[in-house]
Amino acid sequence: MSTHRSIPLSPMADGPRSGPCLAGAFSLVELLVVIATFATLLSLLLPSLGSAREAGRSTVCLSNLRQAAIAVTSYAYDFRGVAPPGAANFLANRDRWHGSRAHAQQPFSPAAGPLAGYLASTASGTADMGVRTCPSFSATLRTLADAGAGFERGCGGYGYNNAFLGVVRRRSASNHNAWLLVTDRSGSALHRFRRPDSTLAFADAAFADPAPAGGLIEYSFLEPRFWPDSPGNRPDPSIHARHAGRKARANLAFLDGHAEPRPIAFTWSSGLYPQPAVDAQIGWPGADDNNGLFDYD
C-alpha cells in the first residue's frame, strides 16, 4: 500500500499576488518631503559657508598686508631709515613699489620692484605673488588680466601710501597746511611719522572704472583725502571695502606693523571718471576729514 505525501506549494506558486508595498519603503509623498527638507537645509547652510570662506580670505589678506608693512620697515633698516619709493621717477611711468616695466603699456613685473627681495618666497628667492595678492580680489584680477585692462596692472589689489610714505615732502613756507614734493626717487624717513600706529602703509585698493571686472581696476596707491600740495582739493579715493560682513570693510596695514579692517566712512567722486566711487564701495575710513591717516603729523 503506497503512502502519498503532499508537498507544500511555494507562496508564489499560484502566481504573483497584488497587495500593499513592502514594509519600510518610502511613498512618493514621503520622498518629496525628504528632498524638500534637504533643499531647505542647504539654502540655510550655503550663506554660512560663503561667509566662512570670505572670513578666511579676509584673514589671509590681513596677513599679506601685515607682511607688506613689515617689508617697508625691513627695507628702511637697510636704507638708513628711509621707506621705499612708491613710484620712482613717476613721469617715466615705469617703476612702482611692486615692480617695474619696460614700457608704459605693459603690466608691472614684480622682479625688480624695491620690495621684491623683502616679499620674496624663501623657497625660490623670487617675489611672492601670493603675499602680494588679495584673495578676495583674485577673481577680478584674473578678469582684468584676461582682458588686458587697467593702467596699474601688477599690484595685486593693494595700494601704498605713496602720497607721503613713498616720496619726500617739505612743508610749504606760505601755507602751513601744504606739503610740497621734494623728490619721488626716495621714500620718506620713517622717523618723520609721529604716529606710526595710525599712519597707513598699505590697504586694499582699487579704482572705480567701467572695466570688464564690475567697475574696478587695480590701483597702486592710497590717495589721501586731500592733495598734499593743494589743501582743500580732493583726489578720487582708492581704498576699497571688498570684505563682506555686516558692513563692507577694507583691510588696512599701519607703519607699526599691525593690520585691521575698517569700514568706509566717506566717499566722493570728482566726476572725471564715469564710474562713481560710491557704487564700487571705494572711499576713506575714519571720521576725521583730513590727511591724518597718511601724513607726517
Image (cartoon, rainbow, N blue to C red):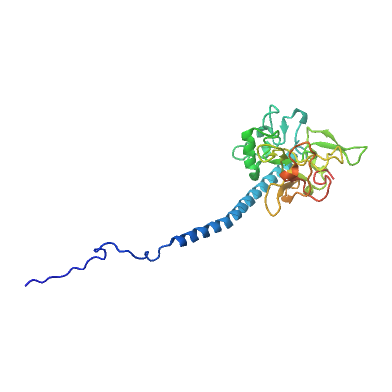
The quadrant the C terminus occupies is top right
**Looking at the image, which is closer to me, 291 or 54?**
54
Residue 215 is situated, as x and y percent measured from the top left of the image, at 69, 40
Count of number-bearing discs: 0
**Looking at the image, which is closer to me, 189 or 175?**
175
- Residue 130 visible in the displayed image: no
The quadrant the N terminus occupies is bottom left
Which residue is located at x 84 percent, y 37 percent? 169
Residue lying farthest front? 18
Q: Is residue 43 above or below residue 178?
A: below
Residue 158 is situated, as x and y percent measured from the top left of the image, at 70, 41
Residue 74 is situated, as x and y percent measured from the top left of the image, at 72, 41
Which residue is located at x 55 percent, y 58 percent? 40
Residue lying farthest left? 1
Examine the image and state in which quarter residue 106 appears. Answer: top right
- Residue 50 visible in the displayed image: yes
Q: Is residue 10 left or right of residue 98?
A: left
Which residue is located at x 78 percent, y 36 percent? 272
Residue 249 is situated, as x and y percent measured from the top left of the image, at 71, 50
Examine the image and state in which quarter residue 268 appears. Answer: top right
**Looking at the image, which is closer to me, 46 or 127?**
46
Examine the image and state in which quarter residue 224 appears. Answer: top right
Residue lying farthest top? 103
Q: Is residue 48 above or below residue 110?
A: below
